[in-house]
Amino acid sequence: MTAAPSPFRSTRSTPEEREEKRAALLLAAVRMFNERGFHATSLEDVAASLGVTKPVIYHHLGNKDQVLFECVRIGLAELQVAAAHAAKEPGTGFDRLKSFLRRYAEVIMGDFGRCVIRTSDEALSADARRKFRALKREIDQALRAMIEAAAADGSAAVKDVRTTAFAFAGALNWPARWHQPDGPVSASLIATELVDVLCGGIEPRERFRTTAR
Amino acid sequence: MTAAPSPFRSTRSTPEEREEKRAALLLAAVRMFNERGFHATSLEDVAASLGVTKPVIYHHLGNKDQVLFECVRIGLAELQVAAAHAAKEPGTGFDRLKSFLRRYAEVIMGDFGRCVIRTSDEALSADARRKFRALKREIDQALRAMIEAAAADGSAAVKDVRTTAFAFAGALNWPARWHQPDGPVSASLIATELVDVLCGGIEPRERFRTTAR
DNA sequence: CATTCCCTATACCCATGAGTAGCTGTGTTC
DNA sequence: GAACACAGCTACTCATGGGTATAGGGAATG
């Protein structure tokens, strides 16, 4: 009825317009996946939220598996960018690690990052599942490498890299479940606080123990 | 064809036998939910894994929502038992907190605990979802109370209770995603190591800094 | 102006699995 | 031993949603 201000006009598109449509569809899809869950979201609903119909999604993105995989692929690519960016920063290995952890948490609270965490392997087809796991493994290895680097230059005290990586990843992934994107407290603040807790621990130190009020 | 050694004989059952059947059905269901995911598991498959048919599940457990909710209810009850048990232990508040955290992680690596974490709210009906959230909230409050107690008696150094609780819960919930129950490394070892990392942090302390080899 | 090529909508097929009605066989009870 | 109650099975309905065939319609191209 009312003309939607969307990029979907019925005409031949330039490559840029195609990409714009793809992006709009993916964003609508990932948001609905995050909100309702993948299985409770029909592609019909996703299309309808943009004022178009189901075949448009199949035309631009492929089947439901491909849509979901593309969403998590983007989220994992964001995490890889975060890792690459942090690795180039100055300071000690520990500084770089903390920077990565903060960026990691912020990505996880974004649309595509949340989808990475909320998507369980079983939701994907066998083929996509394999790729999904491989990408997640790359992130895990990047995290372990940065923990190892921080331990190697003496700027962090790490007993077991593997356990540390799992603990940190778990703590930073968890906001994907509880954080409200439109809530009062910003993602970057949460990220900073979480990283502080993880790095500092809660065992009392000299400077704390003296001032127990 | 071959007679199954299951508790399902076609006869009138005593209350104990009924309970035994319920338990067997729930265990089969939760294991299949954990392995394949809730949506990818049909009640027919669950029943077939015990050599019975779908109506048996409806007879003993109710519909699929009720089955899932019962699974997460059991897992959350195990966590409450862990909290109650830890609260009675001797030592400092920090000792009791660490004990709770270890038990928490072990429960999460069990059948029903895993289901609690792997189940997202959207999978449940509106009614069950409300109860699910209320139970999870109770666990969260118990965790926060123990962190506060440890901070109050000076045995732990806590900046922000809320953030600490989220970080710890996330790190301890995460094994529900990656831990292999039949793998080489035991749940209790993982629990201990995770709690060590969380409590100790990785910021270098005096005793570590001197022995950088 | 006609043709062609995309793009989108309509309308459909079909597999899956939740949930149910009713039958049957078996032990229990009077 | 006859009626009964219960547990489980067979066989079904039906809603949902993934995926597709096909038609229409507008812009570029000659």
Image: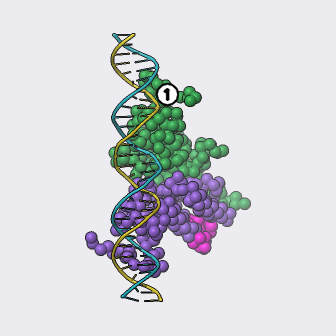
Chain colours: A green, B purple, C yellow, D cyan
Query: What residue is drawn where x is 43% and y is 66%?
Result: B57
Q: Amino acid at mark 1?
A: Phe
Residue to which mark 1 is pinned: A8
Residue A203 in sight here: no
Judge whether residue B94 is colored magenta: yes
Q: Residue furthest left?
A: B1
Chain to which mark 1 belongs: A
- What is the magenta range? B84-100
Query: What residue is drawn where x is 52% and y is 43%?
Result: A32
Q: Left or right of B151: which side holds B56?
A: left
- Height in image: A19 above or below B151? above
Q: Position of residue A8 (x, y in %)?
A: 49, 28
Q: Left or right of B162: which side holds A128?
A: left
The secondary element bearing badge 1 is classed as: loop
Query: What residue is drawn where x is 40% and y is 33%?
Result: A59
Magenta stretch: dominant secondary structure: helix
Which of B5/A84 is in front? Answer: B5
Judge whether residue A166 is colored magenta: no
